[in-house]
Image (cartoon, grey):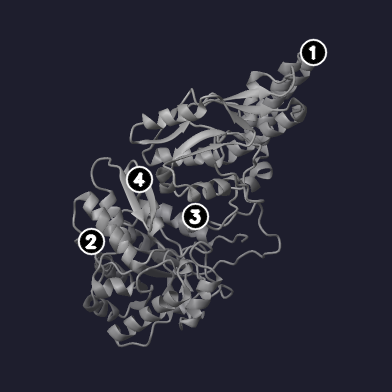
Amino acid sequence: MVYAVPAGRGLAEARNEALAATTSGVLAFIDDDVAVCEGWLGAMHDAWRTAPEDRGCIGGPIGVRFTGPRPAWLTDALLGVLGVASGGDSFHGGNVSFRADALRGIQGFWPMRGRPELHDWFSEEHHAQRELAATGWTAAAAPLAAAERIVDPAQIGRWTVLARRARYGARSALIGERRRRAVAARVAATSAAGVALAVARRREAAATERAARAAENVGTLLAPLIAHRELQPTAAHTPFRHSVAPPQRLLPDPLRVLRRSGAVVLLYHRVDDGAGSGVSPANFASQIDVLRSTRTPAPLEAIVSGDAPSNAFAVTFDDGYAETMRRTLPVLADAGVPATVFISTAHVGTQRAFWWERVSSLLRRGTRRPLKLTIEDETRAWADARSAQLHVIGWLQPKAPEVIDATLTELAAWAGEDLAVAEHERPLSVQELRELASSPLIAIDAHTRTHPNLRLIDHARRMEELVGSREDLARWLAIDPPAGLAYPYGTPGADVDLSTRAAAKAAGFRYAVLTASGTVTAATDRYALPRLAPADISGDDFAALIARAARPRRG
């Protein structure tokens, strides 16, 4: 039994600490105001012992135990805000258990701030259950594993119930049911009128129920003001998630000025048919046409140095896929559009496949199959391997190359395939890179050697990755070491922080690009240049995307 309350950090972090500490195959949670009933442990044990292999979650009912006389106005319809539930498809954190390796497979609990007294369907334990279902795990109820919520009537007043229902409505509006504001306003008004009628008729319980319905819909109308903060993360990382996006602001910073429209930098990875998250050749060509009709093409270095017009656009490619460059160079040449290619040099030098492509390819195979992986003494599992791609790739990002290679070997054995590199996945060869660099339209810059998450590795390896990639390109192409860097993964905060940017500068780079939308102006940090990654869209949709990226906004 572990009892952990990290001060000010929320229950999600406590639950992640428990998941990191446990050596058991099953992790069960109850709340501090919940008492399990006689036979609970045996019933939970039996439920897991007889569970099918794809069972990821088992929960039990939560009844109520009052420590004093129950208020007459507190009807059964209002008990839900106290965390009383019969169970079903999703279970409250007061009486729920998880298969530990499955829970690690979805990267544990999302570290939202939360509020311990709230027992609705929008907390971290319910988010985890939805993630488990998305990766193929099933859930089941264990009716005999019952528990009771202990409620002191003296501590539960009408205003407590109304406040919690208002928060329920607000949280539902932000991350649950998208109720129309007009409907919410109408229901709030009619319910409020019903309160007055019930009071006049001295129907205390009915008045409270209608007031609760009104409060829920008022919460829907005022959702950001009521629930925004508690849905934001409290941690930049967890034991199972190497990076968490920073909290979003409720309102724009009033001290920041409007951003001026500036140059747009486009980020592509793969351009070929069936490229998964890439862009098809036809859509790439149409996107270039849209850009040429609305903006002025320019080399990235001209935008960085301020020698390009404010409506300029630059095209960049990351990694160095041979098929992508074979397909795109004729399109760029026909349109007269220059491009910068950021090269992951170890892949080019060794002709090893980009490891994330191999992970995706191996996990996409055929029918639904379970997968269990152990990496550095930590085991994670997925009931449906096809849904594990992003989780596995995220898990491997900060790992050493030899750990990634061992995992690929294990995945290949699991899939019954070899690690041969498919033609559409292979990197450029050194000779192909030289031929590409000979084009007057193409500039070659660095993307590290092995494509690690630079924020998560030690300083010595970070500098070796940065300096080594510059040296590789200078030696292969007989040029000065490149001036530009593309950070691998590149999300600000999550993958790139102040120390990462300082390392890029210390390695000799003059500018570096992110993976984040925005425009480039004279005021933009040269080691944090935004790039927009287009989806596989064409025509009007792409034009609208560019317009949104360049629209003045607060930030």
Say what secondary structure mark 2 lies in: loop
Measure the C-alpha gap from mark 2 to mark 1: 75 Å
Q: Residue furthest top?
A: 201
Q: Dots 4 and 2: beta carbons under 8 Å?
A: no
Residue 195 at x, y = what percent? 75, 20
- Marks 4 and 2 sit apart, C-alpha to C-alpha, by 22 Å
Q: Which residue is mark 4?
A: 387
Q: Can the viewer see residue 270?
A: no
Calculate the distance from the C-alpha at mark 4 to the C-alpha at mark 1: 55 Å
The quarter of the image holding the C terminus is: bottom right
**Which residue appears at 40% of the width and 32% of the height?**
48
- Judge left or right: residue 455 versus residue 101: right
Residue type pointed to by label 2: His
Q: Which residue is mark 3?
A: 239
Residue kind at label 1, given as amino acid type: Arg
Is 494 placed above or below 447 here? Answer: above
Q: Is residue 497 left or right of residue 386?
A: right
Type of the residue with mark 3: Pro
Instruction: Say which quarter of the image contains residue 522.
Output: bottom right
Whether residue 152 is visible, yes or no, is yes
Horizontal side, residue 112 vs residue 165: left or right: left
Q: Is residue 248 above or below residue 503?
A: above
Is label 3 in a helix, a strand or a loop? loop
Mark 1 vs 3, N-terminal side: 1
Query: Helix, strand, or loop for circle 1?
Result: loop
Number of the label disc, if any, that sits on residue 424: 2
Which residue is denoted by mark 1 in the rendering? 202
Q: Hey, what amino acid is under mark 4?
A: Ser
Vertical comparison of 82 with 227: above or below = above
Q: Quadrant of residue 480?
A: bottom left
First of labels 2, 1 by sequence position: 1
